[in-house]
Amino acid sequence: MATAPASSTLLTHKHHVRLGRLPLRSGAILDDVTLGYETYGQLNDAGDNAVLICHYFSGNSHAAGRYDSAEPVPGWWDAIIGPGKPIDTDRYFVISSDALGCVRTDAPHGLTTGPASLDPATGKAYGPDFPALDVRDSVLAQRLLMEQLGVTRLAAVAGPSFGGIQALCWAAVYPTMVERCIVAIGLAEFRAREIGLYHAMERAVRLDPKFLAGRYDPQEPPLDGLALAVELMMVAASGAEDLHSRFGRHPAPTGTGEWAIENWLDTEPRIRARNCDANAWLAMLRTNMRWDLALGQPSMEAALARIQARILLIPGTGDQLLDGTSYHDPMVDALRNAGSTFSVQSLSAEGGHLAGLSRIAEAGDAIRTCLNTPMRT
């Protein structure tokens, strides 16, 4: 098991690129698209030492390092990105990109085109009129970003959860450009249980009286409904043992509820919800619910057979948000049937779905091995 490295002193900056008009899978077109990203390390002359990092559902492109030395918490995958770390910024040019419709709207983390952005045609926020997104739309936007940065080939695409979904999509849509695909707690398709859970989160937002069919006042957002959706996500994504070791059956302080975990859930989700846009949250839910690796192919195996990349799967054995048995085992079977080159490194059960963030250092050696192993021929 890899030892967690020391916290990073890597400094980074949030960048934004203008991509112009972007055709979407739905047939709609987004004009004047802006995409946020960060970079670490240097691109080589051949443009082929790049590693693309894709973020999780409620994340953003701040994957590693700090914006300044006083920032209290580094990026969410700082444990494995940086000088001498498994994704070594002395060796690789690492790009971390926002996804279209990124739920974060707080600067400098936000500003990528999404429902809270201004529609150039009207001068008003898209709101509920923002077009439906497919995972492939974000991948296309990232592909255009790679072109602007001079990247000719990706040594790897990696990410946790929704980031792992994007990594799989990259490997399937652009098979000759991706050498390795590192999928932490990702899945090949959303099944009925996951769709149902995300539907419940959507209803929590829509039932808030301030939601107003998505045309809410940005100064008076549906914070109660969005906080409840965030709470549902937090409980489902957290590891059961982690929560119990942290809160147990301890009583809450006087006047804040019966249990300590209730006190936490009464406050933390609202803090997180204030940094997110409700319409973007709904758009991200739907983007995830539409995910199916088959991508129009007759089967998952047919889609996987298109992938030329070496694949590293990093499941969370205690994952209860995207149940490990329902998503991991079928994907492994499909990879075997497709003749894919892949390996598996599981994370601790205690971390639940969030092990893809909090315990990713456990997979550090496997990530190093994957990056050091030549692409299959």
Image: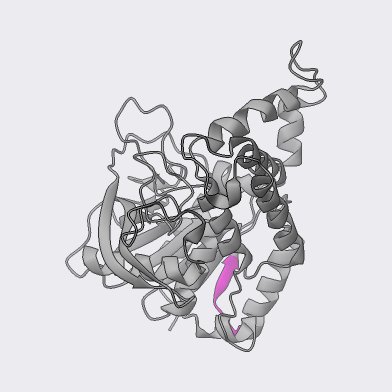
Tell me which segment is drawn in magenta: 338-343
Q: Residue at x 38, y 60 (%)?
A: 52
327 with respect to 148 (left or right): right
Colour scheme employed for the rendering of this structure: one colour
- Residue 375 position in % (x across, y down): 42, 75
- Residue 367 position in % (x across, y down): 48, 57
Is 349 drawn above or below residue 333 in the view shown? above
Asked if residue 372 shows in the view, the reply is no
The quarter of the picture where residue 153 lies is bottom left
Residue 271 falls inside the magenta stretch: no
- Residue 163 position in % (x across, y down): 50, 58
Asked if residue 376 shows in the view, the reply is yes
Front-lying residue, 21 or 300: 21
43 with respect to 30 (left or right): left
- Residue 205 position in % (x across, y down): 64, 46
Q: Work out which quarter of the rendered image holds the C terminus and state it.
A: bottom left
Front-lying residue, 318 or 253: 253
